[in-house]
């Protein structure tokens, strides 16, 4: 079990009509939880409607929606990531599976959707020096 530490520098907004977030990291610096809140004038960030994202094991994202009242949040989406030898090779949301092609630095350059009978390139991107995006088409998820 790793110790969790809340970040002191994470912005949390409670002004009129703003959205803020707070994040929690483990002892290795990996983000394990993100809570986004949306408040109105005079609203309380602690009881506001929010979206909670849990980053489990570095390979899963589970998103929950909390309406601002009650004691439970509902699961809105799950994304699973697949890696091979520390390289990201795919993702799945339970319905669609995408294979991800990466460059030597680990940046995703192409995403291929694997829908039965309809495999297609859904997005691609090219990076220049210092990480600036030179080309982008479609959607890289």
Image: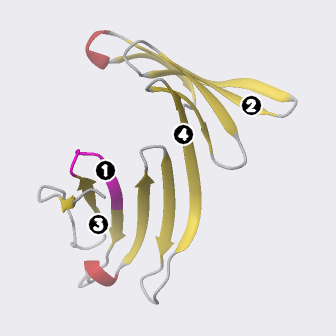
Q: Is residue 79 visible?
A: yes
Q: Name the image quarter holding residue 49.
A: bottom left
- Percent position (x, y) of residue 56? 44, 53
Q: Give neighbour class at mark 1: few <14, some 14-19, many 20+ (Cα, 10 Å).
A: some
- Percent position (x, y) of residue 32? 34, 55
Look at 29% across and 66% down and name the residue there.
Answer: 18
Q: Are marks 3 and 1 in contact (CB under 8 Å)?
A: no
The stretch in magenta equals 27-34
Q: CA distance from mark 3 to mark 4?
A: 31 Å
**Lower position in the chain sequence, tag 3 or tag 4:** 3
- Percent position (x, y) of residue 134? 40, 13
The mark lying in front, picked from 3 and 2, is: 2
Look at 50% across and 61% down and name the residue there.
Answer: 63
**Lower position in the chain sequence, tag 3 or tag 2:** 3
Name the residue tied to disc 2.
Answer: 114
Query: Which structural element holds mark 1?
Result: strand
The mark lying in front, picked from 3 and 1, is: 1
Q: CA distance from mark 3 to mark 1?
A: 23 Å
Name the residue tied to disc 3.
Answer: 18
Q: Give neighbour class at mark 2: few <14, some 14-19, many 20+ (Cα, 10 Å).
A: some
The mark lying in front, picked from 1 and 2, is: 1
29 drawn magenta: yes
Query: Which structural element holds mark 2?
Result: strand
């Amino acid at each position: 079990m790793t110790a969790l530490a809340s970040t002191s520098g994470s912005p949390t907004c409670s002004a009129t009509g703003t959205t803020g977030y707070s994040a929690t990291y483990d002892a290795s610096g990996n983000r394990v939880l993100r809570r986004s809140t949306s408040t109105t004038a005079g609203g309380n960030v602690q009881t506001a409607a929010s979206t909670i994202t849990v980053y489990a094991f570095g390979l899963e994202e589970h998103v929950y929606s909390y309406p601002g009242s009650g004691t439970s949040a509902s699961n809105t989406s799950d994304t699973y990531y697949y890696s091979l030898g520390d390289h990201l090779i795919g993702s799945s949301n339970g319905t669609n599976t995408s294979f991800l092609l990466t460059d030597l630095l680990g940046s995703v350059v192409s995403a291929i959707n694997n829908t039965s009978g309809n495999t297609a390139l859904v997005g691609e991107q090219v990076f220049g020096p210092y990480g600036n995006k030179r080309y982008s088409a479609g959607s890289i998820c």
